[in-house]
Structures are given as C-alpha cells and as structure tokens.
Amino acid sequence: MREIIIDEEFRALLPVLDGETFATLEESILRHGCRDPLVLWNGILIDGYNRFSICSHHNIPFETVDMEFDSREDVLIWIISNQISRRNLSPMQLSYYRGLHYKADKTRGGNISGKNQYSNEVGGQNDPQPKSQTTAGRLSEQYKVSSKTIKRDAKQASAIDAIGEASPVAKRKILAGEVQIGKRRLEALASASKEEVEAVAAEIEDGIYEGRTPRSSAAVEADIASDSILPEIRQLNAIISDFASSFNSMFRSLSTGGSAEVKSVLRSYIDQLEDLYKNM
C-alpha cells in the first residue's frame, strides 16, 4: 500500500466531524467500501482524512489520485475552497476560511496556479483576474462580501491560528461554535501579546472563558459623575449626549430634504469637538 504523508497544517483546515457523522461515514465505508479516492499532492494527503483514518483502522483498500500545484499556498487555497463549497459552514467558519484564503493568496503574490481536472470550479479561484485588482477586492467579489470584511477575516484567522498554537482544543471549540468569542475580540487578539493569547486559549480550553461585555450605561454615567474624571471628559460626554438626543430630528430633516439643516447641526458639533481638542 502506498505511503500516505499526513501534514498537520493541512489537516487542521478540516473541521472535526462529530461522533454521529463520523459513525455514519464509517458504517457506509464498512458496507460499501471507500468509493471516493483520496487526493494527494507530492504524497501528502490533502482530501479524505476521515476516510483514510477509517480505512486504515479497518484495513479497507482505497484508491488515490494525484494533483499538481505550483506551491503550498495553492494547495491551501484548494483545500479552503473545497471546504467552503462542500459544507454548510457557520459564519465563524466562513470568516476563518475567507481569512486563510486571503493570507495564502497574499503569500503567493496573487499568482494563479495551473488548472487540472480536480480544480474546484466553485468561486473560480483559477480564473484570470486583472492584475490591477487587489487580493481583497478579488476575494470580496468571489465571496460576495466587502474588501474590509476580507481583511478583518484575515486578522480573525490569524488570532484563531495563534490560539490553536497554544491550544488545539480551544481552536476546535471556536470553529465548532462551542464557545462564543466576538469578532472584535479576535481582531484585537491578532496583535495581542503571546501571553494574552495563551491566557485566552487556556480559559477556552478549560471552559471558563467569558467574552468581554460592554459596560452598562448606568456604570458609564456613574464613572462620569465621579470627581476623578477629567472635566474635558465630562464635556465630551455632554457633546455626544446632546448629539444623540438630536439625532432623530436630524434624521427626519434629512428624509424630508432638509440636508442643509443637518449639515448646519453637524458643523456645530464639529466646532465644539475641535474647540475641546484645542483646549486639552
């Protein structure tokens, strides 16, 4: 039997099957055999990890097919595209894969790999693209999201991978939706210290992680009323509060064509902020 190489980075891209789904796949292979070939690149398994595990455990024969890619990044993109096209992914998983796609594409410099019979046609990652188009712009069209979303996805993917380095269990929990961690929190963790990432990973693995929740308005007002707060902060709060209370009437004016009035009000608040800034 041909030797199969397992690459941990490639395998980590694949969501872990839950017990029921794995058991169903195992029963099917035991009854009908392994009907789909395993896909290899230079002897490395890039598709069919669960089938390979089941076949190896039960000594069931399987077939393989080889694919050619120009680079490791091309392989990553192929695996990612396969996952997105095959599975009903959660928003977090979709964000993660889009981010990985962006990072891999940036690493390879946006070069387009050669096609082969097993190239995934969903998303058209091998279609010629204008050279002037940015990676984020191209992927935003492919995934029907904004360029800013693609770049945020990349930060979140970096944070999830960093958490995974500290704790593979924590990474699995995030992608499986077993723990709720906000996207803004992930973006912040992308540039956080190694110690902070490891602390979050440990909390997630131990099941004690609690996402940071916004402070209540009552707590904010109590702090503002405190003597320890700078007078400039109180003034800023007053400006913002005044603006918020006037927003509804401003919106009505704008909807009825009174944009000049809205601009006048906005200019007033901008002037107040500028004066406050100069006096600080």
Image (cartoon, rainbow, N blue to C red):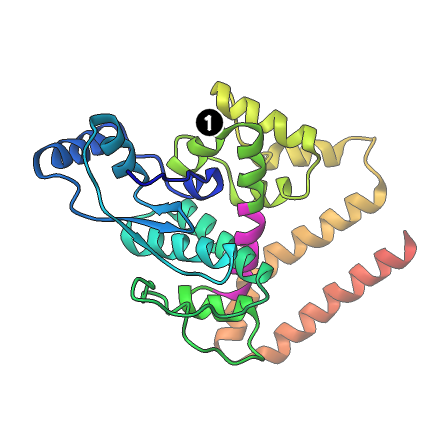
Measured as percent of width and height from the top left, residue 28 is found at 12, 36
Name the foreground residue: 176 vs 148.
Answer: 176
Q: Is residue 202 left or right of residue 75?
A: right
Name the foreground residue: 94 vs 66.
Answer: 66
Measured as percent of width and height from the top left, residue 220 is found at 66, 36
Residue 61 located within the stretch drawn in magenta: no
Q: Is residue 106 left or right of residue 57?
A: right
The quadrant holding residue 202 is top right
Q: Looking at the image, is 123 positioned above or below residue 231?
A: below
Which quarter of the image is occupied by the N terminus?
top left
**Circle 1 sits in a helix, a strand or a loop, which is it?**
helix
Measured as percent of width and height from the top left, residue 272 is found at 79, 61
Q: Which residues are magenta?
A: 146-157
Identify the residue at image location x=44%, y=61%: 69
**Total marks placed:** 1
Residue 153 located within the stretch drawn in magenta: yes
Identify the residue at image location x=29%, y=32%: 53
Identify the residue at image location x=90%, y=51%: 280
Q: Looking at the image, is 131 positioned above or below residue 251?
A: below
Read off the residue under disc 1. Answer: 169
Going by the picture, which residue comes out furthest to the left?
31
Q: Is residue 163 left or right of residue 53?
A: right
Q: Amino acid at mark 1?
A: Val
Going by the picture, which residue comes out furthest to the right?
279
